Image (cartoon, grey):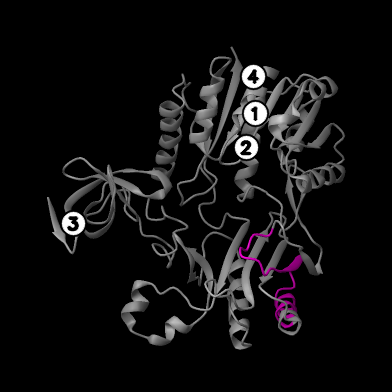
Amino acid sequence: MGRKQTNKVIFENITVLDAGAKGVSVAKAPEGQVIFIPNVVPGDVVDVQTLKKRKSYFEGKAIKFHSYSENRIEPVCQHFGACGGCKWQNMKYEQQLFYKNQEVYNNLKRIGKIELPEFESILGSEKQFFYRNKMEFGFSDTRWLNETEIKSEDQSLSKKPALGFHIPRMWDKILDIEKCHLQEDPSNAIRNAIREFAVQNDMPFFNARNHEGLLRTLMIRTASTGEIMVLIQFFQENKKQRELLLNYIYATFPQITSLQYVINGKANDTLYDQEIKLFKGRDYILEEMEGLQFSINAKSFYQTNSDQAYELYKITREFAGLTGNEVVYDLYTGTGTIAQFVSKKAKKVIGVEAVPEAIIDAKENAIRNSINNCEFYVGDMKNVFNDDFIAKHGQPDVIITDPPRDGMHKDVVEQLLKIGANKIVYVSCNSATQARDLALMDEMYKVTRVRPVDMFPQTHHVENVVLLEKR
């Protein structure tokens, strides 16, 4: 049943049916339209107030619960619902895994339209909290108020600065974070100490709309080795206040391995075109995996769940089925982590990556690890695999590809088909684009193994590893 209220429809006694894309759940209106609802769990029965109407669906919010799903649990985080980072914290972990596995299957089946083997069981994460090794926080001179704070009518709250996360879909709004359950301590202690010290010393927090202030972003990276990197991004140079803050951080947290900063006055806060300046320690931290060490600098890409990355790489190596005699090409190699991880089981590994700085790191890591059978090259993936490249480095027996969320360019897929390696191991963080690519390769390759891997508990994100073998 539906009723109108201030130009918005309220649907009553709606049963939440499924977990959908981007962490929202799915229900059906009485006339059959899909309703997307955040912060509910499949099995909940709710009244829904619609917020937006589209041709074939509504976006809404639950305003009353009639009954709760048996798969609902109490979120552990005080910021749940406002933050938007851990959208599934109210769902039992085994159900999170069920829906992630289902998403991968649906994408491969519906988008790829290919024959699939029986899925191997999704690999859950042993750590369901405090698993991330990289966190980025924003400074704001006016904090976002949650419902409780608004109802308190304490006008001073809105004037307090914030250090935390962007509110979803609101680029200029920052939710102040007291305790985040994603990164191990001393992450929370470092962030809270920085905020308190900056407030006490009248350091201006950033205003994204007016483009003014001093403190812009904070990045904290940790490693399984215990090493810690802290990077402060300042909007403008103020040597006195900058040194005051950085010296305080280093004195308060002597366990920090790398303390760095950036002066960034441009429109956006991305680091990749900025000069990173070292204040104390060294300009990288070390990650370790099976005795291999990988240097992680401020701009490096590294899987953000270190423990689960190890499991992901083990599955990748297992799917490759290496015997020690194979030539392996590792596409989108980044800093060469997968390439070096599989190298002891291969004759030779050729890593290719479009980002020159990443290849520099890959070569340095190979030297650090005394690996002599890995070679790394910079190049556009869709252009690099010409006849001369193949003639020089050898016909690959196995290709490993781990592209970004957009998947592989169709020209890259065409190159893979032209090369015709016996096996392709496709690692993906987006099973929808992976499915699209698998469909393009279906005539030559058959999918023989599939195993999803949960890298990000409490979220809808899931990695997937697929083995393709030549027909």
Compared across the picture, whether 87 is left or right of 226 comes to: left
Q: Looking at the image, which is closer to me, 279 or 117?
A: 279
x 37%, y 86%: residue: 154
x 59%, y 24%: residue: 467
Mark 4 surroundings within 10 Å by alpha-carbon count, few (fewer than 14), some (14 through 19), many (20 or more): some
The residue under label 3 is 10
What is the magenta range?
Answer: 244-271
Q: Earlier in the sequence, mark 3 or mark 4?
A: 3
| Dot label at residue 412 | 1
Q: Secondary structure at mark 4?
A: helix
Which three-letter amino acid code belongs to the residue tagged 2? Pro
Evaluate whether residue 39 shows in this view.
yes
Q: Quadrant of the C terminus?
A: top right
| Dot label at residue 417 | 4
Query: Residue 112: image x %, image y %?
Result: 47, 26
Mark 1 surroundings within 10 Å by alpha-carbon count, few (fewer than 14), some (14 through 19), many (20 or more): some
Which three-letter amino acid code belongs to the residue tagged 4? Leu
Tag nearer the camera, 1 or 2: 1
The residue under label 2 is 403
Q: Secondary structure at mark 2?
A: loop
x 85%, y 37%: residue: 371
C-alpha distance separating marks 2 and 3: 43 Å
| Dot label at residue 393 | none
| Mark 1–mark 2 CB contact (< 8 Å) | yes
Q: Secondary structure at mark 1?
A: helix
